[in-house]
Image (cartoon, helix red, strand yellow):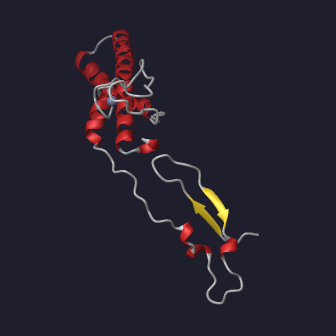
């Protein structure tokens, strides 16, 4: 049974799987002196290697809100309404690492509900429209606002991920 394990990690920008090997043979069992434990193994505590520095976040967020590449601000971020392009057509930046998931939908609902809910109360208190008019106008308005915001918030989230070098950016 192996008492001591060595973990070696991949280096460089491309992550690789850790490889775990038994280094029990490196320990001389007959040698006098303190026993080498797993916590003393230098292979288990490799020197910290800082990754590349973060990029400026606000320009990337502004470019994302404009549905542009967070790197150059010129190339289109989307291939369609919400489908991200794999690489920027202008600068060639790899955008396939983006993982926006439910974030854009969450932000769209959050902002749309706060703004349109407040507006609906103000309009009702001020103008007292008929219920059908109020329901029709705000139903269309809420859908339009949410659809307008959704790709922009997705661009915002991709911009943040790109600037913070998340998910392999
Ligand atoms: Zn670009």
Kindly indicate the quadrant of the structure image that contains residue 5: bottom right
In-image side of 152 versus 1 (left or right): left
Q: Quadrant of the N terminus?
A: bottom right
Determine the residue located farthest toward the right in the rendered image: 1
Query: What is the number of callouts on the image?
Result: 0
Where does the image place residue 74, in percent across and percent down from the top left?
28, 26
Where does the image place residue 151, in percent across and percent down from the top left?
38, 25
In-image side of 117 versus 13 (left or right): left
Q: Quadrant of the C terminus?
A: top left
Determine the residue located farthest toward the bottom in the rendered image: 32
Instruction: Say if 165 sits above or below 4 in the image.
Output: above
Instruction: Say if 116 sits above or below 137 in the image.
Output: below
Judge by depth and name the residue closer to the eye, 22 or 80.
Answer: 22
Please name the residue shown 45% across and 28% down the image.
Answer: 86
Please name the residue shown 37% across and 30% down the image.
Answer: 92
Where does the image place residue 45, in percent across and percent down from the top left?
52, 68
Instruction: Say if 24 sits above or below 17 in the image.
Output: below
Judge by depth and name the residue closer to the eye, 91 or 146.
Answer: 91
Residue 88 seen from this side? yes
Please name the residue shown 29% across and 12% down the image.
Answer: 129
Judge by depth and name the residue closer to the eye, 84 or 32.
Answer: 32
Kindly indicate the quadrant of the structure image that contains residue 123: top left
Please name the residue shown 38% across and 33% down the image.
Answer: 93
Image region (quadrant) for ligand 1: top left
In-image side of 70 versus 45 (left or right): left
Where does the image place residue 131, in percent across and percent down from the top left?
36, 12
Residue 114 seen from this side? no
């Amino acid at each position: 049974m192996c008492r001591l394990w060595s973990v070696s990690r991949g280096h460089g920008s491309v992550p690789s799987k850790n490889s775990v090997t038994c280094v029990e043979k490196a320990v001389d069992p007959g040698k006098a002196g303190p026993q080498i434990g797993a916590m003393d193994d230098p292979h288990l505590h490799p020197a910290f290697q800082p990754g590349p520095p973060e990029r400026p976040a606000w320009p990337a967020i502004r470019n994302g809100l404009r549905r542009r590449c967070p790197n150059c601000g010129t190339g289109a971020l989307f291939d369609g309404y919400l489908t991200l392009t794999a690489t920027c057509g202008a600068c060639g930046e790899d955008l396939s690492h983006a993982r926006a998931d439910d974030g854009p939908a969450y932000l769209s609902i959050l902002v749309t509900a706060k703004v349109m809910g407040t507006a609906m109360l103000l309009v009702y208190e001020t103008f007292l429209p008929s219920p059908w008019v109020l329901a029709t106008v705000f139903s269309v308005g809420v859908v339009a606002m949410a659809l307008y915001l959704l790709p922009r918030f997705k661009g915002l989230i991709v911009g943040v991920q790109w600037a913070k070098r998340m998910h392999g950016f």
